[in-house]
Image (cartoon, helix red, strand yellow):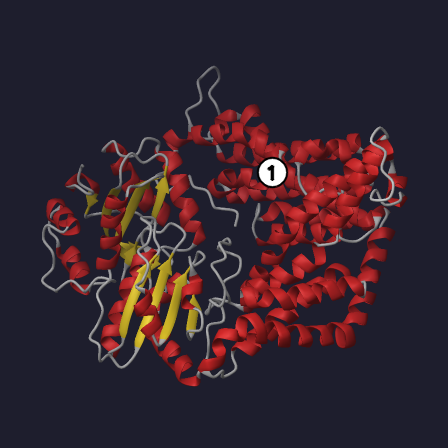
Amino acid sequence: MTELITAELVDLTLSAGTKDAAVRALAARMAAAGRVSDLDAFLVDVADREAQMPTGLEGGIGIPHCRSAHVSEPTLAFGRSAEGVDFGAADGPADLIFLIAAPAGGDKDHLGILSTLARRLMDPAFTEALRAARDPEAAAALIRGDEPPAETEPETETEVASADAPFRVVAVTSCPTGIAHTYLAAESLERAGRDAGVEVVVETQGSAGFNRLDPALIAAADGVIFAHDVEVRERARFAGKPTVDVGVKAGINRPAELIAEVRALAERGGTNPSATGAATGTDPDEGGGAAHGEGFGTRLRRYLMSGVSYMVPFVAAGGLLIALSFAIGGHEIAGAPSVADHFVWTEGDSWAALLNQIGGAAFGFLVPVLAGYIAFGMADRPGLVPGFVGGAIAVTIEAGFLGGLVAGLLSGAVVMAIQRARIPAALRGIMPVLVIPLIGSAAVGFLMFVVVGEPLAALQRALTDWLDGLSGSNAVVLGIVLGAMMCFDLGGPLNKVAYAFAVGGLAEAGEGNLKVMAAVMAAGMVPPLAMALATVVRGGLFTRTERENGKAAWVLGASFITEGAIPFAAADPLRVIPSAMAGGALTGALSMGFDATLRAPHGGIFVVPLIGAPFLYLLAIAAGTVLSTALVILLKSHRAVPDAPGATRQAPEERAPADAPATAAPAH
């Protein structure tokens, strides 16, 4: 097994004005050492991770890192900058920069070495020794652990403090990559615990797997801290304990506050708002309770997206089945009698009616699922029952999609309020299975039936009537707005808002809702298709990696995966994003103007047979794609050096400045 870092991977005079330039310089050393096979593709993977969360840490440290298929073996490069490089830390630039690269399937031994380094970064003696290192070999030896600082290494997470500790805390830390922040947060919490005289034992759920805390430790703990950006695995083990639930960065930057917070919560008799059920296995943006330190807008978006993400499969299944039934039996098939009473195997209308009624049954779950999983996103499993009940009531009173949104938020808020109440220890075990579902459902039912139900139903009817009545310039303006939103952040929050608006409308009957869905899907296909076309028309304006990405963008765009344009937008946002928005706005406007309709929430060109006015719909997509292509070529041409007649154009990556970004940002 080769060494994780050698002198060739150390730059003690790193000269870089931006984090992109710093990362590129260190990555180039990895490539020169034969540990990175494709420099540009690796930088894209680094930027994907960087976009999830800044990698700057307080104390002048930057730790850009990722797992990548372009890394042959776990590797670390180190740079020391005299001027400092901004990696997003609150206290300013970083002078110690560690680029950590692991293979896509990195082995546990090497990932263990990486985690050890991440924890040592919290040791002031270690970082000061690195700042004082005089040559690359000495710095590499220090990082490898050949020359550890004099300070004694802290105890590992399996060690337990003395039995007479006044207060005991168990913690779980995790981050999206599971390499660095996971272990930095663990070390930070353990150090803060020692300073405060509190016993803190941490379970790190990283890339190398995790060793479960001893159940006896959990049982004896007075409180729990979750510092995580991905879902805590097997969180049901911590049920009934006072719990502070935060992002992993909070575990690194303010561990003493978290310990004080969980201590105060335990003294008040508070319980765990998010560990009361079994492990959920949801995505990082779903469930798990609210993370402290997030703004209200961020939390609200996370709650709503949790509900929408669970609702979309029901919309997809139900919408496609209903659309197929119309294609086979015509729109009048919606009035067919129940197939349970009348079904003829040899009649096409019977099969069409069957598809229509199955799709209708799937659609019946839309609003309850939306409400239930919004509440789940706020309060975890205890929110599910009140949320589903509130959503079902929204259907009963015809409050529709808006009623489901409100019911979900009300359910989550009611459950969170119940969880904050002081509960005797003897009753905590029955809270999630009896008390919370009972009180929560009763409270939400009262609010939905008596207080907010009728106003919401009236508002839903007004919205549906407005969409159905859209025509001419009004429809075109709405198409422009939705199309531009879909292309602004390419799968980000604004894109998701437009998409959620369209998907929510599918739950309601009305031609206007189907027009909105068509316009949103058409606009979302434009950016990747336009970038793919641009790389064919003027390939010399793009790097080799971008030209390769362009080949994949054809398929991604045709499949309504807007994120296919992200590598291009991240490398040149000021030219790509405005071009994409212009094309998306044109496509949305034309789709609305052509009265194109779509009941399915996804599918790209694969659902064209189910689209109303399909040829005009495809024309709208083609027009937007051509406009975006022309604009991005025009804007890039003004920047580029003109081609010499008859000369072979030099690839942009061969003549770009060192700090030119060649990175991509993730969609979510």
In this rendering, the answer to whether 31 lies above or below 208 is above
Side of 169 where 138 appears, left or right: left
- Quadrant of the rendered image containing residue 383: bottom right
Asked whether residue 597 appears in the rendered view, the answer is no
> Could you tell me residue 599's position as x and y percent?
76, 43
Label 1 residue SS: helix
- Hey, which residue is sitting farthest top in the picture? 646
Side of 36 where 650 appears, left or right: right
Q: Residue at x 69, y 60 (%)?
A: 368
> Could you tell me residue 210's position as x and y percent?
32, 54
In this rendered view, identify the residue nearer to me: 463 or 240: 240
Q: Residue at x 40, y 35 (%)?
A: 41
- The residue to which callout 1 is attached is 527
Q: Amino acid at mark 1?
A: Pro
- The quadrant of the picture occupied by the N terminus is top left
- Quadrant of the rendered image containing residue 155: bottom left
